[in-house]
């Protein structure tokens, strides 16, 4: 379309509709001489005006309004061959898989002009949190970068929002964390109760739900998103088992409930200490099996970011002496306590939802007290087991004193 083809625009108010403000543009195609129109409904007049302003800006640069409003999925379908030109077939296959399986579900609904650097950044970190491998995320971002670069060439956008940095650092952080996850755990139940009370005290109106969610997360070794996804119908009050089926995670379109990180449901025991609190929350939900077990003070869904902001997390943990404690460390706490309690490794893996025993193994590293106890047990074995060679002179009395 030639530059600066004039658009006529209007906003119609239709109060009987769920989206009462319809914005419409009309223009004459300079080639066909046909009059064309395009419309979209909005919840507010300001939203409708912003849509019109964006189309006027695009038209001033020679961009057809119908092209300016294409979603990312539509634009990618129409221009993928051009975007991937010059690549070998062995490269295009993983690129197209990344586009189909990750980009389109997460960002495909957005108009190309509304795909921002922030949206790409948040989506990438969500893929990492879901357990996608480094090469998978790299290929997915690569195809998104190419499609958005084509949009730059077509004049739909002025800069490529998919060129983000720093995401690979997240994998290094995850690897460092797995080296010694025990060091991230709270020391005991009393410390957890102190943390929960401090977070409630720092929140607006001292909302007790924040403390309950934190206690539940640590006692079940669950992620905050999984705690948020818990429903009343998932709780077995007879056997005190939580069937963990879903998690709540941020997405470009808002919060969304989806499958667990491992893509399968798992059963988690509810220990005696949390049963009264869980029973009270189930009763408070009445006869609503789909009601969430944990919500914010206004009934909203909980995320790690919401919990952080609502409880002034950083200030609260700093005053308790846990300067580097994060919400995910509640999960490390639960798994560490299970290991110290003697829960078998293969059972801990199933409760945690780990893909392999290798991930669960680091929680079994003995702490100092366990090493000291092992020394005493070894000494007892040497000095009291019949049939063993006698220790060197003077050693037996020394071992007994220890």
Image: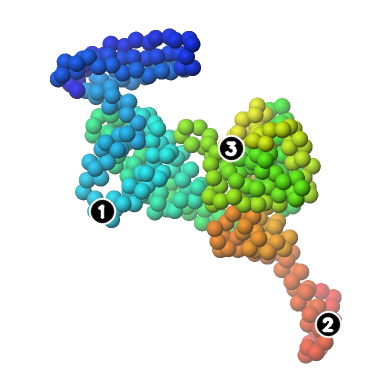
Q: Which residue position is annotated with label 1?
A: 89
| Labels 1 and 2: the sequence-earlier one | 1
The residue at the far left in this view is 31
Question: Measured along the vertical axis of the image, is residue 341 above or below residue 13?
Answer: below
Query: How busy is the neighbourhood of tag 3: few (under 14 within 10 Å), some, or many (20 plus)?
Result: many
| Labels 2 and 3: the sequence-earlier one | 3
**Number of numbered callouts drawn:** 3
Q: Are marks 1 and 3 in contact (CB under 8 Å)?
A: no
Q: Nearer the viewer, residue 262 or 316?
A: 262
Q: Quadrant of residue 118?
A: top left
At x 81% / y 74%, what residue is drawn? 402
At x 82% / y 87%, what residue is drawn? 386
Q: Which residue position is annotated with label 3?
A: 303
Q: Nearer the viewer, mark 2 or mark 3?
A: 3
Question: Is residue 120 among what the camera can see?
Answer: no
Q: Which residue position is annotated with label 2?
A: 384
SS class, disc 3 = loop
Q: Quadrant of residue 81?
A: top left
């Amino acid at each position: 379309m030639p530059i600066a083809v004039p658009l006529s625009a209007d906003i119609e108010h239709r109060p009987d509709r769920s989206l009462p403000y319809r914005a419409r543009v009309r223009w004459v195609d300079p080639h066909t001489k046909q009059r064309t129109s395009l419309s979209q409904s909005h919840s507010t007049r300001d939203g409708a005006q912003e849509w019109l302003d964006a189309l006027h800006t695009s038209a001033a640069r020679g961009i057809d309004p119908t092209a300016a409003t294409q979603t990312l999925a539509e634009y990618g379908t129409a221009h993928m061959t051009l975007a991937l030109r010059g690549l070998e077939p062995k490269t295009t296959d993983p690129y197209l898989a990344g586009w189909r399986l990750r980009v389109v579900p997460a960002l495909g609904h957005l108009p190309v002009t509304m795909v921002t650097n922030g949206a790409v950044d948040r989506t990438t970190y969500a893929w990492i949190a879901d357990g996608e491998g480094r090469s998978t995320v790299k290929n997915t971002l690569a195809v998104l970068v190419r499609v958005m670069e084509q949009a730059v060439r077509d004049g739909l956008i002025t800069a490529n929002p998919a060129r983000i940095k720093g995401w690979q650092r997240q994998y290094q952080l995850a690897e460092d964390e797995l080296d010694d996850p025990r060091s991230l755990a709270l020391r005991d139940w009393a410390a957890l109760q102190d943390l929960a009370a401090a977070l409630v005290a720092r929140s607006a109106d001292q909302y007790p739900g924040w403390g309950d969610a934190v206690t539940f997360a640590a006692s079940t070794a669950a992620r905050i998103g999984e705690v948020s996804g818990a429903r009343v119908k998932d709780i077995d009050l007879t056997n005190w088992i939580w069937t963990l089926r879903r998690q709540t995670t941020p997405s470009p379109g808002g919060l969304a409930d989806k499958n667990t990180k491992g893509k399968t449901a798992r059963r988690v025991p509810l220990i005696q200490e949390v049963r009264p609190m869980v029973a009270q929350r189930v009763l408070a939900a009445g006869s609503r099996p789909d009601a969430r077990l944990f919500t914010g003070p206004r009934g909203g869904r909980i995320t790690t970011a919401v919990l952080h902001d609502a409880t002034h997390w950083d200030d609260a943990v700093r005053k308790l002496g846990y300067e580097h404690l994060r919400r995910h460390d509640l999960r490390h706490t639960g798994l560490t306590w299970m290991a110290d309690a003697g829960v078998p490794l293969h059972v801990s893996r199933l409760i945690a939802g780990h893909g392999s025993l290798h991930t669960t193994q680091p929680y079994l590293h003995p702490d100092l007290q366990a090493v000291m106890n092992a020394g005493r047990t070894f000494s007892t074995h040497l000095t009291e087991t019949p049939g063993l060679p006698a220790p060197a002179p003077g050693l037996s009395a020394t071992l007994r004193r220890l």
